[in-house]
Every structure is written in structure tokens, then in C-alpha cells.
Image (tube, rainbow, N blue to C red):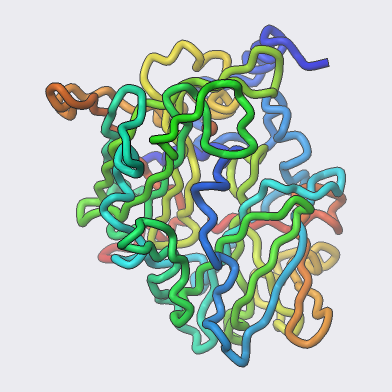
Amino acid sequence: MLPTPSQTVGPFYGYALPFPDGGVVAPAGHPAAIVLHGRVLDGDGAPIPDALLEFWQAAPDGGREGRPGSLRRDHTTGGYAGRDGLSFTGFGRVATDADGSWTLHTLAPPAETPYLAVCVFARGLLHHLFTRVYLPDARPDDVLRRIPVERRSTLFAQEERPGLFGFDIRLQGAPHEETVFLDLA
Amino acid sequence: MSPTQQEISAEIAAQAAPTSGALHPERRYPPYRSSLLRHPSQPVVALEDPDAVELSGPVFGVTDVTELDADLTRQHHGEPLGERITVTGRVLDRNGRPVRGQLVEIWQANASGRYAHQRDQHPAPLDPNFTGVGRCLTDDEGGYAFTTIKPGAYPWRNHTNAWRPAHIHFSLFGTAFAQRLVTQMYFPGDPLFAYDPILRSVTDDAARQRLVAAYDHELSVPEWSLGYRWDVVLDGPAATWTEEGR
Ligand SMILES: [Fe+2]
């Protein structure tokens, strides 16, 4: 069957898609939590304040089955309760701030799949984009090997201090600046 | 200087590719001005990775959604203004198999064409009885259903006298993260279709038609609501739709 075409997320998803603690994937108080953060930038290098990022990753033990509990509702008030704070759902959703910045608290993915899958949505972007965040100590896998060396670094987070990693997503730029985007053919 | 509708329409006509078979918008679509600095200039890297994490995806369950979430007309004390409608359909993969137990989220303007969002400054009235956000999980047949009101058209600033046709924003998940889809559902026969660069960014006529719901009189409820049907087919890597028995 032929797929339903994509359309932009537009500017007004902010009261619909983000949810409380959407960027807090690591269970509360987990000793191995790491923090990823960065900015989403346009072709002028200007921050994009209305992008939405989604993250999906394997659990530290390699599990990819995920868990519900990301979007919990309060059954009494009908309001959003957000995460239960216990399960590792593997799923994060973060809207960028006025300065284009985002933050994700999570657990490091396993060495076999040492990356987080990222899906980028934004006003002005007619079809979402996939990329990956590799942690700095990731060994080149088949995917990285297929990417020209000068562009590969755009997929690696930089360790800023222990447990804190920076990763900017540049939607448009020179080959060595523009984030590599992936299509799983 | 903001372009005129005539200028944008000429650009739309120049980009038209009615039988190209293109399935999705090009990310660079100049008539939609905001796309110009927000599309990659480098080619997207196609990869075949049978072990990719993107071939699995997040899961949702009973804790994530309540039944009330699918009825946008019952989220406040009073009734929203507007034309009450139901929107229902199935979520399928490219093999036509139902996508079961997955999250469908919608958001939309109210009957006057105004979003309950601070950044929407369109001088049309807010409706204290309508927020315009819904969600549900698909059933065993991949079915979803929402009760809501028909959204109004609204102006935007792509060009002078730019108006969006009435639409409902949809966000959908498949079993694989790589099947993720965010899109918009339109209503049949809207006179604004020809003028809208966002809809027209889908340049293939048949593909664009897949964004338009069908009015279904069988779904209309006497003395109550008008029914629309809209099925969604999730795109995704071949591995998610050629593998049998998932
Ligand atoms: Fe909209």
C-alpha cells in the first residue's frame, strides 16, 4: 500500500505533544544517568525555537521492548501525570526552548548499539528527519563506516564533563557542519 | 515584501508534478518559505541495518491514555461551539496489516480557526470549552476514533492573504520508530486546497488525495454528528513491512 504523506508539525503542537518529564527517560535517582543536551540550528546557524525531538534507544541491558508509562494521565483530573519515574521506557520527547536548546536525561545505550535514534520535527520541515547520537567511545559500526569521514563527527556527542554530553543538530550547512540525516531504506 | 498569493500560486504551479509518484513532500519546497533554511542541503544517507534500533519502537499502554482523551468535546464543563464530527479510520503498514495498540495523537484549531496556543494571535475567538487535543490507542484492527468539532480555516504569514484549509494534525507511531509519521488530515472539497503551499508540497496528485478524509454518511449519527473516514498507511523501512508474521 502507498503511504500517507508527511506534513509539517507546524508551530502549534506545543500544547499537544510535549508531556511532563518528556526529557527525563532515566528512572528517578538512577546512579548511571547521563545528560545529553544541545541546540537545533537552521541554515543560518540560528536557533530553532519550535523544533520537537524524539529519542528512542535500547536499554542498557540491550532490551528494545520499551515500557509504557511515558504519557500517564491522572484518571481523576484527566490531567497529564507524565512519567511514572520508575520504568525505563526508552522513549523521550523534548520541545526546543526559545534558544533552540534541549536536554535529555537518560541511561547510556549498550555497547552493541551505542547510539540514540533521533527523530526531528519542526515548523518549516515538511518531512521529519532521522539521525543518531553516538556516544564518544562508540566504535564505528556499519552505519558510521558508510558516512564520509569528514561528516561522521556530526553524529558524535562531545563529552563536556563526566556524564554530560553536547550534541547540536544543524538542519542545513556545509558538508562538515550539517548533521548527517539517515533514511532506513 | 511579503509575496502575493498570485506569486505563490505561480511557484506552486511550477513545482507541480501530478503524476510523479512522489510519496512525500520534498523538504525543500520554496513556496513554503519556512522550508528554505530548514531542509538539509546534503543528501540523506540511506542505510540498511538489519540490527538498527529504529526497527523497534516505543510502546504505550493503558496508563498512557484515558477514554476521555478521544472525545475533544467533553474535556470542559460546557459544549464547544462548532459542527460536531467523528473522525475514524485504520492505521496500517505498507503490507496493509493493522498497527495495533499504538498511539495516535491529534491537535487542531477550534471552529473559528484559533488554536488554544499562546503563539496563535489570529484575532478569532478562543472557545473556553475547546482545547483541541486528543489521543487514543489503536485497537486490534488498527482502528482509531475521535469525536471533535470541525476546525476552521486560519490565516498565516507565509504570504499576503495566506489561509490554511481546515485540517487536523495527526501524530502516529508504528511498531518501528522508523515508521513514525506526523501529518495533517484535510476535509473533502475545501476551496483553499489550491492555494495552500503546505498541502501542495505533496506534488503528486494521488499522494495529496491520501491526505483528504472522506465524508461517510454511514458514520454520521442522526441529530448528533457528521462522520469522516481517514485511513493512514505508515511508511517505513522494507524490513518493517516485508517480514511476515510480525
Ligand atoms: Fe494547523
Percent coordinates x, y for residue B131 in the rendering: 44, 39
Q: Residue shown at 12%/23% (left/top)?
A: B222
Is B190 positioned to the left or the right of A46 in the image? left
Is A65 positioned to the left or the right of B37 in the image? left
Q: Residue shown at 39%/35% (left/top)?
A: B129
Camera-side residue of A185 and A53: A53
Q: Residue furthest top?
A: B6
- Whether residue B96 appears in this view of the structure is yes
Camera-side residue of A63 and B235: A63
Q: Quadrant of the N terminus of chain B?
A: top right
Percent coordinates x, y for residue B156 in the rendering: 64, 23
Q: Residue shown at 54%/21% (left/top)?
A: B124
Above or below: residue A65 compared with residue A62 = above
Above or below: residue A56 compared with residue A141 = above
- Whether residue B231 appears in this view of the structure is no
Q: Residue shown at 75%/53% (left/top)?
A: A100
Q: Quadrant of the C terminus of chain B?
A: bottom left
Camera-side residue of A88 and A156: A88
Percent coordinates x, y for residue A7 in the rendering: 54, 37
- Count the marks: 0
Q: Residue furthest bottom?
A: A31
Percent coordinates x, y for residue A67 in the rendering: 40, 75
Above or below: residue B155 compared with residue B238 = above
Q: Residue furthest front?
A: B77
Is A25 positioned to the left or the right of B108 in the image? right
